[in-house]
Amino acid sequence: VTRAEHGTCVAGAATAATNNGIGLSSTGYNCNLYFAPSVKQDSIHPYDYMIKMAQEGAKVIIICNGGLWYVSEFQIAINEIYDMGAVIVVAAGNIPSVSPIYPGYYDNVISVTSVGHLHDPSSDGPLPGEVNVKDCIEEIIGDPSTTNTLNDRVDICAPGYHISALDTGNSYYSVWGTSIAAPQVGGVCGLIF
């Protein structure tokens, strides 16, 4: 997935319009969306953009990238944003690990991992009386290598396997991971404000 595709599917999962007869819908259907770069641009770090967004009134900030490294400036920025009353929702990470993955391991964030279900989304559905929809943390049942990050800092799970997502060029594709789960939680948070 390219950066453009990643940003587009995250934006769609967080704030796609609902009840308009086209495309897909989202949990944050009535929210405004603002973009900030996820990498350093013009000597400005992403966390500086996030602070500016909170200063300008953003109530929910969704972060869907990360890594294994703690960055003290990032934690300071998150604390500042949190103190302004904004909610920071982050993807927990797509590594099958209980180890610290950032930004999901920072303080003052809502860390989101992915869940799926036992029902095969390509089938016609369960037969009458058949119960085959059960949340599971693994994409492939019994294969722990298909599990996203699930450590002691994960706060909530959201659907994250075989999710229809908005693509660049007005098309759709199936995605997986915490980057599609986190914006669903962020959209709900946005509706609360």
Image (spheres, rainbow, N blue to C red):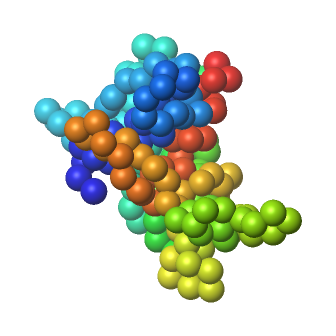
**Residue 190, x across and y down, in percent:** 59, 26
Compared across the picture, whether 49 is left or right of 193 comes to left
| Residue 84 against residue 180 in the figure, above or below | above
Residue positioned 37% across, 24% down in the render: 34
**Residue 47, x across and y down, in percent:** 36, 36
Q: Identify the residue at the far right of this view.
A: 129
| Residue 94 against residue 182 in the figure, above or below | below
**Residue 100, x across and y down, in percent:** 53, 66
Compared across the picture, whether 100 is left or right of 171 comes to right
Compared across the picture, whether 168 is left or right of 147 comes to left
Q: Nearer the viewer, residue 124 or 63?
A: 124
Q: Nearer the viewer, residue 151 or 51?
A: 151
Count of marks overlaid on the render: 0
Q: Nearer the viewer, residue 100 or 24?
A: 24
Q: Quadrant of the N terminus?
A: bottom left
Q: Quadrant of the C terminus?
A: top right
Residue positioned 81% across, 69% down in the render: 130
Q: Quadrant of residue 153?
A: bottom right
Q: Nearer the viewer, residue 72 or 59?
A: 59
| Residue 183 against residue 106 in the figure, above or below | above
Q: Identify the residue at the far left of this view.
A: 42
Q: Quadrant of residue 160?
A: bottom right
Q: Is residue 118 visible?
A: yes
Q: Quadrant of residue 189?
A: top right
Residue positioned 67% across, 71% down in the render: 118
